[in-house]
Image: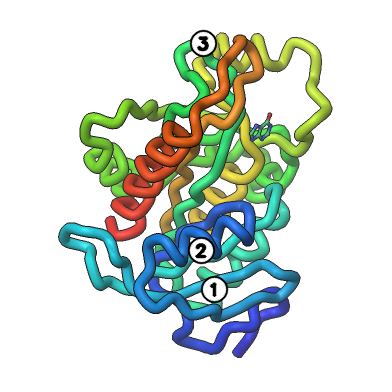
Amino acid sequence: MATPHISAAPGDFAASVLMPGDPKRAERMAKLILDQPRLVTDVRAIMGFTGTYNGPGEHHGRPLSIMASGMGMPSIAIYATELFSSYGVERIVRVGTAGGISAAVSVGDVIIGTGAHTTSGMNELRIPGTHFSAVADFAMAAAAMRAAGDLPVFAGTVLSEDHFYFKVKGQMEALVAHGVLAVEMEAASLYAVAAELGKAALAVFTVSDHLTKASTDMSAEERETRFEGALRLAVAAAFA
Ligand code: HPA
């Protein structure tokens, strides 16, 4: 049966789902890496596709879904909850962008989000009296790391924030001092929903901009190579 925000039929989703934020990106990814991608839902123009993985290697031919999450923690929590609870989904990999804050990372770098701090109150409600630790599934993170090969990747924590534009004074400096690599807007809630429902999740990011150091734009070719690298990691994690 369809859920309030997903119009797919039972069995329409694979056990593994890649989740970019942007529906257009979901469509482009589906055309790029799926054989016979089929649109299975488009409620609110949040498109979801299912096909079989067309890439090389051991995972070629395995069923894989790609669906957008929209922006922000409430949005990804809705879709992740419905996919995990009603469509038999076991693993979700967010494939997103993040703003670099650590001097160690640069625009174009790929980050495996091993854990996500958050400015959101969503996870405060989960375990009474407890600051929930939003962490990635270890097997998925390890699979992503193994798939990196000679692509330079970082593994570490990010901040999942509610505000894109409003910045709290002193927060960036304190985050950097605590080794946080980048900021984004979804991972902490995705990780918490997976924990709640006994499922697995990971977020892999391409650094799209940098908030604390001057950076030069990537060439179109560089952008594609880096994104394909992030996608390769995400697929490895999706099939972990
Ligand atoms: N904030 C949140 N998410 C982001 C940013 C940012 O500055 N850059 C890319 N994704």
Dot 1, how many residues are within 10 Å of its Cα: few (below 14), some (14-19), or many (20+)?
A: some
Badge number at residue 1: none
Dot 2, how many residues are within 10 Å of its Cα: few (below 14), some (14-19), or many (20+)?
A: few
Residue marked by disc 1: 85
Q: Earlier in the sequence, mark 2 or mark 1?
A: 1
Residue that appears at 59% across and 42% down? 188
Residue marked by disc 2: 197
Residue marked by disc 3: 103
Q: Nearer the viewer, residue 96 or 216?
A: 216
User: Residue 180's x, y, as percent?
Assistant: 53, 21
**C-alpha separation, residue under disc 2 versus residue under disc 3:** 36 Å
- As drawn, the residue found furthest toward the front would be 220
Of marks 1 and 3, the one in the foreground: 3
Q: Nearer the viewer, residue 133 or 212?
A: 212
- Image quarter (top left, top right, bottom left or bottom right) of the C terminus: bottom left
User: Residue 46's x, y, as percent?
Assistant: 66, 67
Ligand 1 visible in quadrant: top right
Residue that appears at 22% across and 63% down? 59
Q: Earlier in the sequence, mark 2 or mark 3?
A: 3
Mark 2: secondary structure: helix
Whether pointer 1 and pointer 3 mark residues with C-beta atoms closer than 8 Å, the reply is no
Mark 3: secondary structure: loop
- Image quarter (top left, top right, bottom left or bottom right) of the N terminus: bottom right
User: Residue 90's image quarter?
Assistant: bottom left
Whether pointer 2 and pointer 1 mark residues with C-beta atoms closer than 8 Å, the reply is yes
User: Residue 128's x, y, as percent?
Assistant: 67, 45
Mark 1: secondary structure: helix
Amino acid of disc 1: Ser
Amino acid of disc 2: Leu
Amino acid of disc 3: Ala
**Observer able to see residue 180:** yes
Please state the total of marks drawn on the protein image: 3
